Amino acid sequence: MIKAKSTSNSHGNASSRKSFWTSDNSGGAPWSDLNHGLLFLVLMQLGAFDFLSFSGVCKSWRSVALSKKTRFMASRPPMAIWITKHGNKKEYCVEDFEGRNSIILLPKSDRRTCVGLTCGYLVLFGRRSHDFWLVNHITRHGLHFPNAPYSVSPNQEGVRAILRVKENGIVFTLSIPSVILHEFKGKIYAIDADSFVHEIGLDPEPKLILLKANNFLGYRLEFMEFVCTDENLYAMECFPDNKFKVHELDFGEMKWVSPKKETMEEYAFFVSGLKHSAAIKRELLSDSWLRYKRNAYSDTSGNGMFFTADTWYIPNEWLKVKSHI
């Protein structure tokens, strides 16, 4: 059972979670009879944490919320994640784009560390229990994976992988060495320590298929990760002094190219310490742009706009899996 609570922030918000009622004492029509167009306008003014409250009011409101959830979540900007510790417990906190906080307390959370994200779920590893909890902050849904293995047998023909926990996150150890995995347009791509790109073929046996690019990024690029938009896949170099360089993989020409200036002006890059970075359209950030600039580092040296945090949570990523609302 995952327990959750909410807290207001230090800027004086009355509450981080709104309360919704379906009737009043005026003798008028119940709120459940409100026009769906009007309800949609109300929904789009809410934060990601209010989505469940809104959808739980009544059948009419739930119908609006579920029919518009893709558009709603896609319009929600990234949220910063941090971890606070109280006694022997850890509270996992998420701050939405309006600065409101949500806190989740996990059962048996002592010595449990957030080591990554996937499809909108925080990946939490138990250092004593050697298990994984996957927790969705939006839906409150959790998945438990006990008895994580610690080794993997070599397989030169196929692909076998194991998660290993390090101080700065988790990595996949593959039978064929690879340092980064990323899903893009229904396929999984890997980039190895020598900057060669592979596609992981899943049928009938998982295999690494080398993609022969017509140019080369360079050997031993230590701070490299994949980032993608709906249409393009990028490799991003992250340097220790908060400088970044983005390369686009042109699948048509099968070569690395510099992104178009229009692309770099259209997107802002949210760089996560857990290597779960994302490219977000700047038009979605208009209402919260100043807040991001106050609370995150940005690089405007002509090669794009970048914001850094320990972890960025992207609300619409949970739409990649079956909803548990």
Image (cartoon, rainbow, N blue to C red):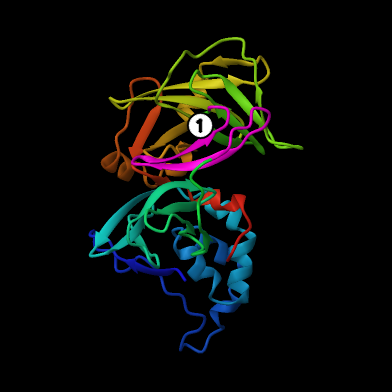
Name which quarter of the figure residue 31 lies in: bottom right
Residue 165 in the image: state x and y as whole percent. Answer: 41, 43
Q: Residue at x 63, y 57 (%)?
A: 322
* Residue 107, above or below 248: below
Quarter of the picture holding the C terminus: bottom right
Q: Residue at x 47, y 85 (%)?
A: 24
In the image, 272: left or right of 281? Answer: left
In the image, 9: left or right of 95? Answer: left
Name which quarter of the figure residue 212 lies in: top right
- The magenta stretch spans which residues? 152-177
Report whether residue 78 is seen.
no
Few, some or many residues within 10 Å of mark 1 (<14, 14–19, 20+): some
Q: Secondary structure at mark 1?
A: strand
Using the image as rendered, state which of residue 137 and residue 290 is in the foreground. 137
Using the image as rendered, state which of residue 169 and residue 62 is in the foreground. 169
In the image, 205: left or right of 223? Answer: right
Residue 57 in the image: state x and y as whole percent. Answer: 53, 76
Q: Residue at x 61, y 58 (%)?
A: 68
Residue 164 drawn in magenta? yes
Please identify the residue farthest to the front as the structure is shown.
153
Using the image as rendered, state which of residue 40 and residue 167 is in the foreground. 167
Instruction: Please state which amino acid type lies under the numbered disc 1.
Output: Ile
Q: Residue at x 49, y 29 (%)?
A: 179
Report whether residue 116 is seen.
yes
Please identify the residue farthest to the right as the structure is shown.
204
Please identify the residue farthest to the top as the structure is shown.
215
* Residue 303, above or below 31: above
Residue 51 in the image: state x and y as whole percent. Answer: 50, 63
Return the residue at label 1: 180
